[in-house]
Image: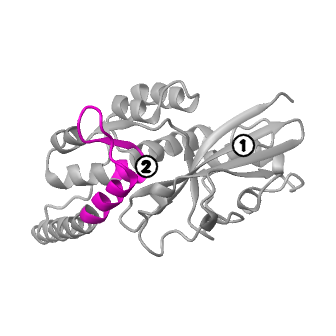
């Protein structure tokens, strides 16, 4: 087998739904040999609320190493993928449209989740650079603006205060710690208002449940295919489909399940 290198992000999600890209992971397959490198993003890890993240299995992050190398299959991966000698492995791989045992691809495609630590994998993307002013001005209200800023910080992207000067890690942490409690309070208030509205509509008999997301399948599927084949980034796919990150991956799974059923 030729040398195959693939990359992904190790992520965790907090109780407010914010996704933190805690580490970049690179897998190298060369024949029957596997090797991995983990590049933790300490600037992001330092933002995570207490109790959400307990570390990466098999790595001592207290050492604050820039990169952790592992030859063979590390425990972090081994706990999450079916072993090569598992009965029925061929059928599992075929269901995920995989030709061979590739742990990283399996973790990106499977719907199964390892609940021991809450860490899961997302497709790799290059770091973005975004302007602080555009985050505040390009959303319909302060709640959406604050949420967008928190998401950019949690993803480890660069935030520009002006045309040239990005925020330093300590500045990012101070900003995050300042606006996260505000976002949490605003989110709770927003949920209370929504619940009251639903309650009133139910009492009046006008509530018909949440409307399903209107998606043009013919337009969505080509974009999803390009994203899967890494022809476009996730940001570009979200822009083209005009859906949220969560809705995008939910729709991909929906249409994949639909195709599998046929």
Residue 33 screen position, x and y as percent: 87, 42
> Closest to the observer: 47 or 236?
47
Check the image and report above or below for 197 versus 11. Answer: below
Tell me which residue sits at (45%, 56%) in the image.
44
Relative placement, left or right, of 16 versus 65 is left
Residue 104 screen position, x and y as percent: 69, 46
- Quadrant where the image shows the C terminus: top right
State yes or no: residue 160 in magenta: yes
Please name the residue that numbered disc 1 is placed on: 27
Check the image and report above or below for 2 versus 196. Answer: above
Check the image and report above or below for 84 versus 4. Answer: below
Give SS at disc 1: strand
- Quadrant where the image shows the N terminus: top right
Tell me which residue sits at (61%, 51%) in the image.
66
Q: Which residues are magenta?
A: 151-178
Residue 261 screen position, x and y as percent: 61, 42
| Tag of residue 8 | none
Residue 194 appears in which quarter of the rendering?
A: bottom left
Tell me which residue sits at (35%, 59%) in the image.
173
Tell me the crowding category of disc 2: few under 14, some 14 to 19, or many 20 or more residues within 10 angstroms, Cα based: many
| Tag of residue 155 | 2
Relative placement, left or right, of 127 versus 256 is left
Mark 2 and mark 1: span between their CA atoms?
A: 21 Å
First in sequence, mark 2 or 1: give its number. Answer: 1
Residue 129 appears in which quarter of the rendering?
A: top left
């Amino acid at each position: 087998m030729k040398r195959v290198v693939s990359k992904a992000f190790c992520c965790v999600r907090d109780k407010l739904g914010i996704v933190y890209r805690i580490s970049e992971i690179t897998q190298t397959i060369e024949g029957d040999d596997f090797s991995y490198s983990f590049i933790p993003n300490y600037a992001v890890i330092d933002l995570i609320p207490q109790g959400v993240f307990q570390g990466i299995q098999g790595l001592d992050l207290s050492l604050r190493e820039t990169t952790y190398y592992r030859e063979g299959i590390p425990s972090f991966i081994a706990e999450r993928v079916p072993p090569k000698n598992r009965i029925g492995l061929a059928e599992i791989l075929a269901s995920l449209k995989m030709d061979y045992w590739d742990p990283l691809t399996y973790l990106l495609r499977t719907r199964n989740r390892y609940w021991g630590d809450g860490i899961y994998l997302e497709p790799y993307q290059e770091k973005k650079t975004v302007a602080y002013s555009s985050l505040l001005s390009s959303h319909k209200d302060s709640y959406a603006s604050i949420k967008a800023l928190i998401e950019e910080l949690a993803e480890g992207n660069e935030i520009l205060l002006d045309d040239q000067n990005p925020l330093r890690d300590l500045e990012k942490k101070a900003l995050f710690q300042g606006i996260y409690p505000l976002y949490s309070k605003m989110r709770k208030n927003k949920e209370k208002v929504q619940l009251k509205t639903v309650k009133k509509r139910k009492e009046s008999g006008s509530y018909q449940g949440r409307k399903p997301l209107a998606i043009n399948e013919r337009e969505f599927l080509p974009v999803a295919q390009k994203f899967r084949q890494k022809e476009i980034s996730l940001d570009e796919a979200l822009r083209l489909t005009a859906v949220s990150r969560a809705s995008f991956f939910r729709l991909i799974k929906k249409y994949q399940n639909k195709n599998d059923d046929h």
